[in-house]
Image: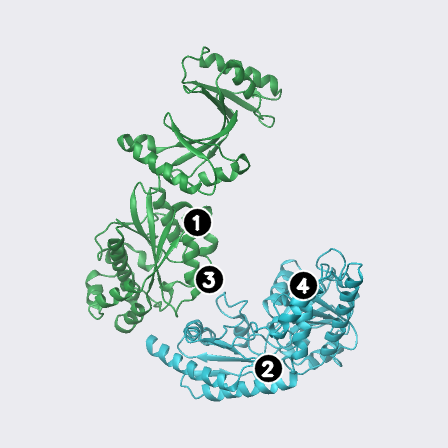
Amino acid sequence: MRNVLLLKFGELFLKGKNRHDFIKLLKTNITYKLRDFVFKLHETQGRLIVSDYDESFEEIIIAKLQQVFGLIGVVVACEFDTSYETIQENIKKLDLSLVKTFKVEVKRADKSFPIKSMDMEKELGGILLEEFPNLKVDLYNPEIVVHVEIRINNKTYIYSKVYECVGGLPLGSGGKALLLLSGGIDSPVAGYMMAKRGLKLEAVHFHSYPYTSVQAKEKVIELAKEISEFCGEIKLHIVSFTEIQEQIHKNCDAEYMITIMRRIMMRIAERICQQNNLGAIVTGESLGQVASQTMQSMNVTNSVVSLPVFRPLIAFDKEDIMSVARKINTYETSILPYEDCCTVFLPKYPVIKPTIKRAEYLETKLDLEQLIEKAIASQEILEITNF
Amino acid sequence: MIYLDNAGTTKMFDECVEVGRKFSCENFFNPSALSVEALEISRLLNETEKFFLNKLGALQGNVIFTGCATESNNLAVRGSLRTGDWEYVFSAGEHPSVYNQAKKFELEGFKVHVVPLNEDGQIDLQKLQSVLNEKTRLISVIHVSNETGAVNDLHKICQIKKKICPKAIIHVDGVQSFMKIPFSLAGLDVDLYSFSGHKLHAPKGVAGLYVKNKSALKELFYGGGQQYGLRSGTENVAGIMQFKKAVELIDVRLNFDKVKLMKEKMICQLSKVNGVKIFDFAGSPYILNVVFDGVKGETMLHALNEKGVIVGLGSACSSKKAGNRVLENIGFDKDVIISSVRISFNAYQTLEEIEKACEIIEEVYKNIKERVS
């Protein structure tokens, strides 16, 4: 008898012919996530099982698995060779002393096992009632369900507690995209949410040294580390925006400052996507949150790129975004007071309903191509891991 | 690199390295142990306490060695807190390690007065007088402001206290004054005085609190009862000995004059630059506030950093937060505060370095101003 971890996946079952590829990806991601541990991962009868690990690390392994996109649950199961006696013996090892109500569910995949599921359930329920006198059976709303699975490989699994995982789709199953990562609360959350739908991420950050501090950049690196806990390795492109900001400040209307900044950021982002084979841009914009996130502003910034722009937070309230940020542990870092490049040169009254025509006109005053080229050429690239 | 953030911290004297090694690797004994070697260390610490009392000019009392000035300030202020109908008086110019205690006292329901600063950055003595009464338990003032260099007149403060509430305790935060400006506690009615090692070329992790009357102070934490029961925990012997070494090497008077020349040089050169305003509070020569019109102080700091000049931005402990409480209290405009940097000297740099720094500051300011205008 030994403990194994049974992994449950959610939507993967729906994926028909792609299911195999999804599971393969999931296995790769799990192997990477657990790279610091010794364990075996195998697939039997449509389910993944982690075994042969050091049980003193069980809790931390479960905690790591809970962060793997594509899994919906992990259970610690007791695995042993099937026989009527071993099942009786092992079910007694469950500790149900603090539980009030329960039921037993038996799945008999191995039809050669002589006792039918219903009969087994009654039998095993009786054993548990004898073992724990305070326990009561409740078939409809039990506090816990004791699962007994009799599989065809002559193994039986008993488990009761399910550890919930984050769900979503395996990282990488949706392709690769570029996250615009500022130092704020929203963008790490946006990245997390898209990664949860299977996107592998790279990130770009624009900084304006000396108008912003080295700490502001450090903060973004820290945020990238924090989301890489879920999102895997992240290639972080750090692009200096100083000269571009100075040029906009000198040559364009103050009220269009942010609009034009964001248009140039999008252009740079698209070029980075092209150079690195990324299929979409992800931003943390939320409708109406600030002047640059009105529908008209988004239209003006969106119009300079042809790649899809994913805005998973578009309909989120700030409070909701903050609660996800807390859940994924980015909130504390996000609220550190270092300014990112958006807040320097901030005009008092940014335009709320910019037009494409006006933005295009103002941009004729800039040597756009040269500015963008130079910014991209001087980018610093960091490989961030914390996965 | 030209380092002009000496009010934040200073470079340790080379001489302290050997002292640290000696008291970590050779005479490493726990002063509370019973061996002959340990007793020797215990004796040394007693001598060192006397040494610091001498340097402070204190005729009586004790020195408690702590881990940092924040701890000294907490021991002094929190340790003087008593239940009952007492009142606690603070200046608006206190360092966060005192000021945030005042805020906390208020939250806990104690009566707290925060006395504003006058335009010279000193505690407003008239207002101080008006809040003192026989219920005043503690008055806490900073000796030299870490933000502006303004010096509070301890003599006058002590006189006022003696007249109105002779039993009240006076705590002075002397982190920017001890071994920097010539003064003596003799003749002053100061009960508690905090000072710190790393502002004086000693290592970080060691500081002190002068205590005139130990029975009036309560400990912050409980343990083996070291240092008269006021600071349980094994003494940082090496740190304390390094601190002593550093203080031995400092000639207050000589350094004061040297630094004064540096400050004057800087004021002279920078005041010629268009757009630069100097705020000299005629206080400590070690600290100078410079305002760069039209450019954020933080931008100047980063741009100077790139050119090898390191300056500070208000208190390094509070510069992470927007605004500046002390400068606001003196009555500075927001625009001025946001454009100000703090330049602070040490006596071991040269006038040539200061001259060079001035050139770089001028060049960087002109460049940035051009770029943002």
Q: Is residue B83 left or right of residue A356?
A: right
Q: What is the chain letter for disc 1?
A: A
In the rendering, which numbered label is found on residue B284?
2
Q: Which residue is mark 3?
A: A337
Is disc 3 in the same subunit as disc 4? no
Identity, as a three-letter code, of the amino acid under mark 3? Pro
Q: Give the residue number, with chain letter if any, for mark 4.
A: B25
Is the residue B58 above or below the residue A2 in the image? below
Determine whether A161 is above or below A110 in the image: below
Q: Position of residue B58 (x, y in %)?
A: 75, 77
Pick whichever of labels 2 and 4 is earlier in the sequence: 4
Toward the viewer: B108 or B279? B279
Give B348 or A193, whichever is nearer the viewer: B348
The answer to whether residue B77 shows anywhere in this view is: no
Q: Residue furthest top?
A: A114
Q: Nearer the viewer, mark 1 or mark 2?
A: 1
Q: Horizontally, is A222 left or right of A59 in the view?
A: left
| Amino acid marked by disc 4 | Cys
Q: Earlier in the sequence, mark 3 or mark 1?
A: 3
Name the outermost residue toward the front.
Answer: B26
What chain is colored cyan?
B
| Colour of chain A in the image | green
Helix, strand or loop at mark 1? loop
What is the chain letter for disc 2? B
Coordinates of residue B355 in the picture (x, y in percent): 47, 86
